[in-house]
């Protein structure tokens, strides 16, 4: 996630990751001008154990169209 904020990557996604692993990353990405959303395209929910981060909302929305969705148990 920090690579998105740094500009070293354009997109990153995780399924099954825990809230404590992504809470700070979400803030860092958003403060740097990036976006974090649910991989299905909805708003990001830190307890869902699913995240898609991108440098732009347009790029994030494009990736949601091709990702195979997985829904792990909530934290």
Image (cartoon, grey):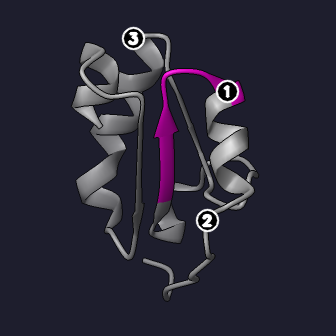
Categorize mark 1 by other alpha carbons within 10 Å: few (<14), some (14-19), many (20+). Answer: some
Quadrant showing the C terminus: bottom left
Residue hosting label 2:
67
Q: Residue at x 31, y 28 (%)?
A: 9
**Where in the figure is residue 57, as x and y percent of width and height?**
67, 27
**Where in the figure is residue 13, as x and y percent of width and height?**
43, 54
Examine the rendered structure and indicate whether residue 37 appears above or below residue 65: above
Q: Residue at x 54, y 69 (%)?
A: 48
Mark 3 vs mark 2: which is more N-terminal? 3
Q: Residue at x 39, y 25 (%)?
A: 29
Residue segment shown in magenta: 51-58
| Labelled pair 3, 1 in contact (Cβ < 8 Å) | no
Residue hosting label 3:
32
Categorize mark 3 by other alpha carbons within 10 Å: few (<14), some (14-19), many (20+). Answer: some
**Where in the figure is residue 10, as x and y percent of width and height?**
41, 28
**Where in the figure is residue 58, as x and y percent of width and height?**
71, 27
In reply to whether residue 64 is colored magenta, the answer given is: no
Nearest-to-viewer mark from 3 and 2: 2
Indicate which disc residue 57 carries. 1
- Disc 1 is placed on an element classified as helix
Examine the rendered structure and indicate whether residue 31 appears above or below residue 68: above
Mark 3 vs mark 1: which is more N-terminal? 3
Using the numbered discs, state the Cα–Cα distance from disc 3 to disc 2 in whole angstroms: 25 Å
Q: Which quadrant of the figure has residue 66?
A: bottom right
Q: Residue at x 50, y 32 (%)?
A: 54
Nearest-to-viewer mark from 3 and 1: 1
């Amino acid at each position: 996630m920090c690579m998105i904020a740094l500009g070293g990557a354009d997109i990153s996604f995780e399924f099954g990751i825990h809230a404590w692993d992504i809470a700070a990353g979400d803030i860092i990405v958003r403060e740097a001008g990036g976006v974090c959303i649910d991989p299905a395209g909805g708003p990001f929910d830190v307890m869902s154990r699913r995240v898609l981060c991108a440098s732009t909302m347009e790029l994030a929305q494009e990736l949601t169209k091709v990702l195979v969705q997985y829904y792990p148990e909530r934290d």
